[in-house]
Image: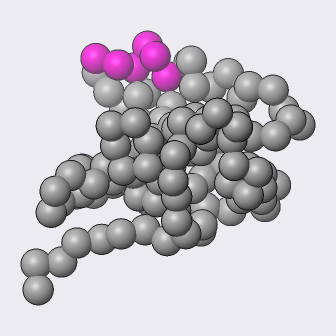
Amino acid sequence: MSKPDELLIDIAARVESARSSRMSLTVVTPGAVITGRLAPASVWRQRVSEVLTDSTDLGAFSAVFDAPAEKEGGPPTHLHFHVARILQGTMGIPETGGMYRVAIENVSAWTVGDFSYSDH
């Protein structure tokens, strides 16, 4: 998107200000469709740090996510997904959901809600 969608920025700002992770969203970005719930950046960073801390190989990187989030007070520049999946054919990857950070300027389309697949 050459000019980020103001409505999408407003949604991200509401998630940040309310400290809520109940907003479900699906976005289209170059090379991926991502569906899941948005989280405030601070909550997302904390969760990623916890996952990395528990990793034998990646524990040293957890400190990167403990640092304060980028510019506080300005409009959000990224969406922070948790319990999210990349949609691929008839499945979502990973099945259990992952943590994704997407630049708002890279979102070309979006819809409220998340998509899930069923074999039935």
Q: Where residue 34 appears, x then y in whole percent?
A: 39, 51
Residue 57 visible in the shown view: yes
Residue 19 visible in the shown view: no
Which residue is drawn at the image coordinates 40% and 36% (left, top)? 30
Q: Where residue 15 appears, x then y in whole percent?
A: 71, 57
In front: 33, or 1? 1
Q: Quadrant of residue 117?
A: bottom left
Q: Is residue 81 magenta?
A: no
Q: Is residue 61 magenta?
A: yes
In this image, 1 relative to 89: left or right?
right
**Farthest right residue in view:** 73
Look at the image and give the residue range highlighted in magenta. Answer: 57-62
Q: Quadrant of the C terminus?
A: bottom left
Which residue is drawn at the image coordinates 56% and 18% (left, top)? 63
In this image, 73 relative to 41: left or right?
right
In this image, 71 relative to 4: left or right?
right
What kind of secondary structure does the magenta stretch mostly adopt? helix
Give above or below for 42 relative to 39: above
**Farthest left residue in view:** 119
Which residue is drawn at the image coordinates 41% and 28% (left, top)? 52
Q: Where residue 86 appears, x then y in whole percent?
A: 31, 49
How does the figure colour the protein chain or chains? Answer: one colour
In front: 106, or 65? 106
Q: Where residue 65 appears, x then y in whole percent?
A: 57, 25
Q: How many marks?
A: 0
Which residue is drawn at the image coordinates 27% and 54% (left, top)? 87
**Farthest top residue in view:** 60
**Farthest front residue in view:** 2
Q: Quadrant of the N terminus?
A: top right
Give above or below for 20 relative to 109: below
